[in-house]
Amino acid sequence: MEMAKSLSGHDKEQLYVVIRGDGEFVYLVNGVNRTLEKPKKKNRKHIQIIKKLPGEVIECLSRGVTDLTAKRAIKLYEQNM
């Protein structure tokens, strides 16, 4: 799993978990207003993939992504930065 930060749009600077990608688009969730049932479709060039994730975040996401784990992973990342 990957995390990403939005670079443009009304959600600029928002953190997301990338759940899947297809070509030039990715689907993002944050567990709050963007859930697994309704992910945000965003162009790849409008996000920045976060390459260095803390171990706690990797461990949280390795269990599988649910709305709760996405929300928890984002919170853990923000606390470590």
Image: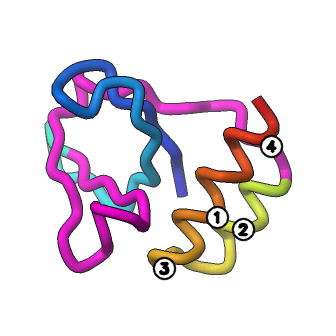
- For label 1, the residue is 72
- Magenta residues span 26-55
Which is nearer the N-term, disc 4 or disc 3?
Answer: 4
Q: Secondary structure at mark 1?
A: helix
For image coordinates 73% across by 51% down, the residue present is: 76
Tell me the amino acid under the disc marked 4. Pro
Q: Which numbered circle lies on residue 66?
A: 3
Q: Residues within 10 Å of mark 3 (few under 14, many from 20)?
A: some
Q: Secondary structure at mark 2?
A: helix
Which is nearer the N-term, disc 3 or disc 1?
Answer: 3
The quadrant of the rendering that contains the C terminus is top right
Q: Residues within 10 Å of mark 2 (few under 14, many from 20)?
A: some
Q: CA distance from mark 3 to mark 1?
A: 10 Å
Q: CA distance from mark 2 to mark 1?
A: 8 Å
Q: Are marks 2 and 4 in contact (CB under 8 Å)?
A: no
Q: Residues within 10 Å of mark 1 (few under 14, many from 20)?
A: some
Q: CA distance from mark 4 to mark 1?
A: 13 Å
Q: CA distance from mark 2 to mark 4?
A: 10 Å
Residue 7, given in percent of the width and then of the height, sits at 32, 20
Residue 9, given in percent of the width and then of the height, sits at 17, 25
Tell me the amino acid under the disc marked 2. Cys
Q: Which numbered circle lies on residue 54?
A: 4
For image coordinates 68% across by 70% down, the residue present is: 62
Q: CA distance from mark 4 to mark 3?
A: 19 Å
For image coordinates 37% across by 62% down, the residue present is: 19
